[in-house]
Image: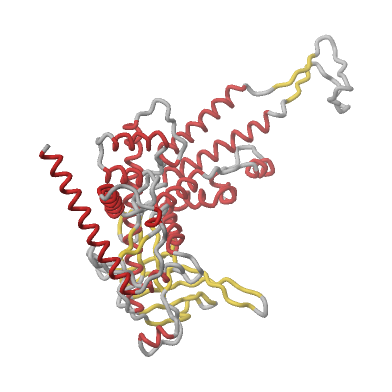
Amino acid sequence: MSEWWQPIKVCAGGTQAFRENAPSLLPIEPKEDEAAWRRRVSHAVLSPFLTRIADQAAGLICRKPVTLQPREEGGEVDEYWTEFIKDIDGYGTDLDAFSRRVVLNSLLMGHSAVLVDFPSTEAAPNLAVERQMGLRPYFLEVRSDQILGWRKDGDSPLAQVNQVRINEYVTEPLGAFGDRVVRQIRVLEQGKWATWRKGDDGWALHEEGTTSLPFIPLAVTYSGKMGELMSKPPLLPISNLNILHAQRQADQQFALHVSAMPILVLKAWDDTDNEIALSANSALLMSAEGDAKYVEPASQSFQAQQDFITELENQMRNLGISTLFSQTYVGETAEAKAMDRSDSDSMLSVVAQDLEKCLQNAIDMAGAYVGRETPLVSVARDFDLQKLDGPQVAQYLSMWTQGAISHELLLDMLQRGEILPDIDIDAEIELIESNKLNDMDLAAAGGNLSEEELQPPQESSGEEEEETNAVRQLSTERLRRLAEEDDSDEGSN
């Protein structure tokens, strides 16, 4: 997998990473001196095509907040979890921002993991004391290239992972004001953990401890799964094209730099002892057979190079997610747009579903630490960014008034088009029907209210309020009977 990660890391590192890998990506040409090669490398720039695609894909997946739902219908989510997702990692990062970071690394590297850890302080005697101390689990993001290796109980696909080795760097104080970065290997096993550090005599055990969980608290999300903790980056073809684009662009830029300074050619010029002054205030005295001219490369070669660069950009656009690029709407049917979106939407849906599973596993592991029932985690799978415009809204309203679509469908389409917020459509329709019924009752009673009835009610005692409510209930029932009688009279006529 490390070979697949290399072009991804170069593209994710940007221009600096591309220049650092110039000996292999932009090698020195035959008979090119090192100084000229370094100048050529210093002008090279890597365009952020891959990172832009990954960022926008992660934004599409996480464009709506991650929600928590009760496990039982009609239940409520424990307030502990609503507060927990506001600071998921102990640094003030909420669940939405953390999820976006995890899925971004998953899209780039093929998979990413979440380590559910617990403060390694003195063990509390019981769960009640642990809660009083304010101890809580927290999430740590583990990139795929940090996982050095793992072991399973057997060769069976159903065998559990019983060991995971993670490469990490920690900061320790050095002297009065300094810090130093130390590399260590964290070894996770079922019910225990350990850290190893390399010293003068090789690797040695640094710390170890136990956990209250009988499994390894590591949740993994994949975007291109090939096996247990193994994957292939789905954006690998785009990263290769991105690097090729930077190479050809560097060649084009260097060629333009050279061709911008044409070469002066002198014919039958014998005076090689003196320097030639090239300015509007100087001239060259040449013989009758002499001539002077500038030599420059043909412009067709630059156009061919530019056409190739443009073709690479088109290939990256076609391989990427169609909605992340500026699309050509002229002569493109709605069916063609839907077909163009189908592959990208299906890929995003798979990644979103796996992210939801990963977050659910992580929340369940945190619940196992604190002994609380966990809610259900939900990641939205609506990736359509196309909002309804004014004419489209007017068309839907016209269809509803003509009876071509139902009221439920109208509100649902307005909600999908992000015209209406997330509302309960059934409750909204019930409220509208209730208001209509009240208006009918008012019309059957004789029309408008008097000015005295429009005045705000004055404070009254409890008995007066009960009498008023009773009278109001009787009046409402009488108005409904009158409306039913009117309907029956119209039917008989």
Image coordinates for residue 399, horizontal then vertical, percent: 29, 35
- Rendered view: 124 above or below 28: below
Nearest the viewer among 483 and 74 is 483
Residue 249 visible (yes or no):
yes
Foreground of the two, 175 or 423: 423
Q: Residue at x 59, y 48 (%)?
A: 19
Q: Quadrant of the C terminus?
A: top left
Left-right relation of 301 to 186? right
Q: Quadrant of residue 393?
A: top left
Residue 165 visible in the snapshot: no
Residue in front for this viewpoint, 489 or 42: 489
Specify the quadrant of the image occupied by residue 43.
top right
Q: Specify how the rendered protein is coloured.
A: secondary structure
Q: Is residue 74 left or right of residue 299?
A: left
Q: List the single residue furthest toward the left.
A: 492
Picture quadrant of residue 357: bottom left
Residue 117 pos. (x, y %):
41, 74
Quadrant containing the N terminus in the rendered view? bottom left
Residue 419 percent location from the top left of the image: 40, 45
Residue toward you, 359 or 128: 128
Residue found at the very far bottom of the displayed protein: 125
From what the image shows, is residue 310 above or below residue 62? above
Count of marks, rendered view: 0
Point 33% across, 37% down: residue: 396
Most distant residue in the top direction: 288
* Residue 65: % across, % down: 40, 57
